[in-house]
Image (spheres, rainbow, N blue to C red):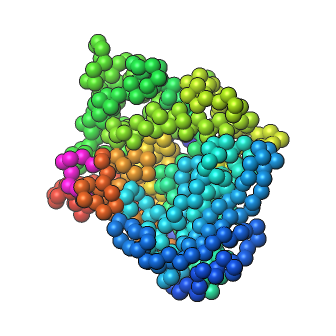
Amino acid sequence: MPKSNFTLAAALAPALLLAACGSGDDDLPQLPAATPATLLSCTDLAGKIAFANTTITAAESIAAGTLKIAGKDVPEHCRVTGRMFDRVSAVDGQSYAIGFEMRMPRSWNGRFFYQANGGLDGSVGTAAGGIGGGGPLDNALNKGFAVLSSDAGHAGSLGPFFGLDPQARLDYGYQAVGKLTPMAKSAIQTAYGKAPDRSYLGGCSNGGRHAMVAASRYAEQYDGIIAGNPGTRLPRAAIANIAGAKTYAALATTAGNLGTGFTQAERALVGQAVLAKCDALDGTSDGLVQDTAACQAAFDLARDVPTCGGARDGTCLSADQKAGIAALFKGATTESGTKIYASFPYDNGLQTTGWAGWKFNNSLTLDTGAVGFVWQVPPEDRSSFNGTSFALTGNLDSMLAKVQATNATYTESALSFMLPTNYGKLPALKDRGAKLMVYHGTADPIFSSDDTVDWYQTLRQDNGGDASDFARLFLVPGMNHCAGGPATEQFDMLESLVNWVEKGVAPDRVIASARGAGNAGGVNADVPADWAADRSRPLCPYPQVARYNGSGSLELASSFSCK
């Protein structure tokens, strides 16, 4: 896998900027706009929808206002629930099926939206359709889309142990999307008398990984895809987070409390040091590191943070802390020195509780179960497994080898069923006129925005140095994992994507706002007190950066330009 290209990107920024600004390949097909329709019926759909290996369990009419989004009533719609491919596993004896729900509005805009859920999946979330960022003010269902959500083929009550079943692994990795998509389109045909004109898919975290996988495996099925903070190489990211747990445990002043290895006071110290070196690189000091690439060249942990001469007191880092933390940001390695995953950019958002939760808690719980049972071949012994022990005493080389392994029972490795095929190549998506919008918070503690930049650089290289005619990446300064952090992280990617897919209007920016006091989508506790509650910024297509125009309010997106 490629190393981080942030330094390279900084050096090449003037040339790359022209490519990002270009209108792209005028020869790509222009997909026509969707046309609306009205729901023909609802409660009788349980008997009307017929598709192979599918059981419809209920169809009910949902009155306007039953669901709300940011205080607004979601219009009347029909909720259909069901499951596909019921079976009993010959490996673990558990019952499996792909559970789903569809919500189909009475007044339909002619579009379908597949809602890719996050984490280990396992539950059928409300099929509303996320539009991107934290505390959304709208959703796909409210916009008139027919929306599908699923559990990706297993019950959440199984925890990570669903990974004992080889088919459940594959459904979770990619096959559930392939099975659900034609069923959903057939159900829409039955409900409205026509199939969807345009189909979209979106999600964040593992949902962002689902989106990246769909862009490569199911390009013929989707016209527009949103991938948020994608865990594109999720098994590697999880093992890297476990490597971090080992480091923080070794640095901890209180045994068993990883957070004492890099305390909140110490993280705030580093965050402020990052701002001191990097905040003004975009033309003004406003508490945001917009020029992430330049920051990684400008900031040095060893040089720019005081070294403790005595006891740690929150005003310095020990020499051991500097060495261990710098190694993790550079990119975690195994005991033998093999690179596990990407580097992470330094960003002020590392001082938040959201960042700490992933590094100090989830590394011992979520990541260990996923590595041990969903991805390793063979899986760990369930009867004796202990997540904390697995993380702190397990061998990283062994973990990395096992997520790449196969055997007679598990015939496809995790690095096959979890990752997009032909990494960094999307010819089918491009050639049919479909579009991909990717966003990633630069303070994401589990899936590195460096990794997504590396992927996008690979995509650019595969397309003559410019992929902006069909795929664009938007970094979100300060944002943690999908939401939170000292960031303007409330935005609508879906509206921009529809305009790009159906009208040919490429997104040259996406306006994002802070979620300060009184925000209808929910308050982000990480918004600094000295920001306007509704501060706004343009999110710029990589490698462009939001730069201050030299005049105007620091609280308004209009005072910044993508350059």
Instruction: Give the residue drawn at x 76%, y 71%.
Output: 52
| Of the pair 11 and 322, the residue shown nearer to us | 322
| Of the pair 348 and 90, the residue shown nearer to us | 90
Instruction: Give the residue drawn at x 40%, y 28%.
Output: 259
Residue 83 on the magenta span: no
Residues in magenta?
527-538
Occupied quadrant, residue 495: bottom left
Instruction: Give the residue drawn at x 77%, y 40%.
Output: 406
Instruction: Give the residue drawn at x 58%, y 31%.
Output: 387
Quadrant, the C terminus: bottom left
| Of the pair 418 and 17, the residue shown nearer to us | 418
Q: Relative to 252, is 121 above or below?
A: below
Tell me if I can see residue 219 in this picture: no
What's the magenta bit mostly, secondary-structure-wise? loop
Residue 50 placement, left or right of 41:
right
Q: Where is residue 450 in the image (x, y as percent from the top left)?
A: 47, 43
Residue 404 placement, left or right of 228:
right
Q: Position of residue 3 (x, y in %)?
A: 53, 39
Q: Relative to 250, is 159 above or below?
A: below
